[in-house]
Image (cartoon, grey):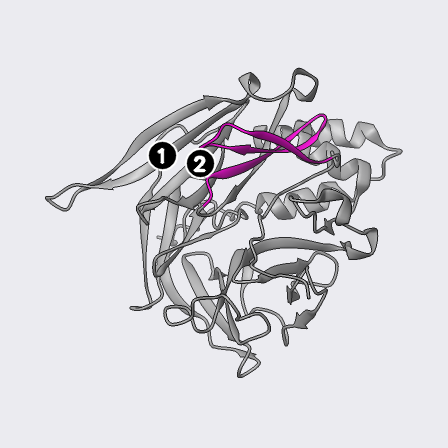
Amino acid sequence: MAPLRRPPQELPEELVEEILLRIPPIEPAALVRASLVCKSWGRLISSLRFRRRTSTGEYVARYVPASCPSARRRADDIRGWRVLDARHDRVLIRSMVHQAYLDVWDPVTGVRRVLTATPPLEYRWNAAVICAGHGSCDHRDCRGGPFLVFVFGANDPDWISLSVYSSETARWDRPRRVAELPEHGMDVVPPCLVGNALYFGIDLSRSILRYDLATRTASVTDQPPGSFGCFTVPMGMRDEGLGLARLKGSTLSLWSLYAYPDGDVSWVKITAIELNRHLPAGALPVSSDFLGCAQGFVVFFVGTQDGLYSFDLKSGMVKKVCDDKGILSVVPYITLYTPA
């Protein structure tokens, strides 16, 4: 009896999007036909995110100071690059034009550190950047110092692998398997650092990958149910525990992973906020294609038809950050930098 063959692996949504974007704008009928291929393609083509990209056709990494939006200069834009993560005075950006090159960027000084070669991983992947002295550094003055980049992806259809880049050796280490690869792979949403562990969304917000920096081990935790149609990002809580922020329509809900004395853990819904009650009427509707979360400050960033707004959960204060409407993602950048 012939061995059973595995069904062909579905293309990652990110790759499907890049393919569909290459359909000429003068052939809209081709997009209509593509939307009928399957439900996932139909949802992708009809999403606000895809419509934005078809109108601009280009990724741009843009630094917008939240305290003084007028301070941004157009010269700061990095075209053809996408922001993946920001931490410890460093921003990790990925080229969307030249394969999968990564740079570490300081948007305040404009300095960019080019990483040698590309991550030795294929398929859908995500990455995080941290100070190399994490655990012993207070991060008050580590700008320009050594750093590490962690890339989680796949070299085969069954496993999530990890490869780490060190700025001190200027090279990637050999990929090693850390967890079984879920059906839909890594989510390309900003990861978070809580205590001594990195957290990544995986499998279309169904689970979270936890990587312990001390033990160098990984584990997977299920997310609370109801992830379909939500944009979900992991976040740190004030008690240094793990939390989740979800945006569905105009509803922002927050969850915390609670540990019971007997060792069991479960998700507890903390609150749900109707953003349309806080945002100006002229800003609505809210875009649920992305959600930015400033770690440690409980400040969220959401897109609207009037631009980008911040929402401070503690004070309830709403502030317009910028007028840009073609935003694909927001990665808050926090720094203690003081100009001379």
Query: In the image, what residue type sits under mark 1?
Result: Trp
Quadrant of the rendered image containing residue 198: bottom left
Q: Is residue 229 visible?
A: no
Residue 340 image point, x, y percent: 68, 66
Residue 64 in the figure: left or right of residue 90: right
Q: Is residue 338 visible?
A: yes
Q: Is residue 319 on the magenta stretch?
A: yes
Residue 231 image point, x, y percent: 51, 34
Q: Nearer the viewer, residue 46 or 252?
A: 252
Residue farthest right in this picture: 26
Q: Main secondary structure of the magenta part?
A: strand
Whether pointer 1 and pointer 2 mark residues with C-beta atoms closer than 8 Å, the reply is yes
Residue for badge 2: 245
Residue for badge 1: 255
Residue 167 in the figure: left or right of residue 246: right
Residue 300 in the figure: left or right of residue 70: left
Q: Nearer the viewer, residue 173 or 170?
A: 170
Region of the chain picked out in magenta, as a range? 297-322
Residue 7 vertical placement versus 138 (above, below): above
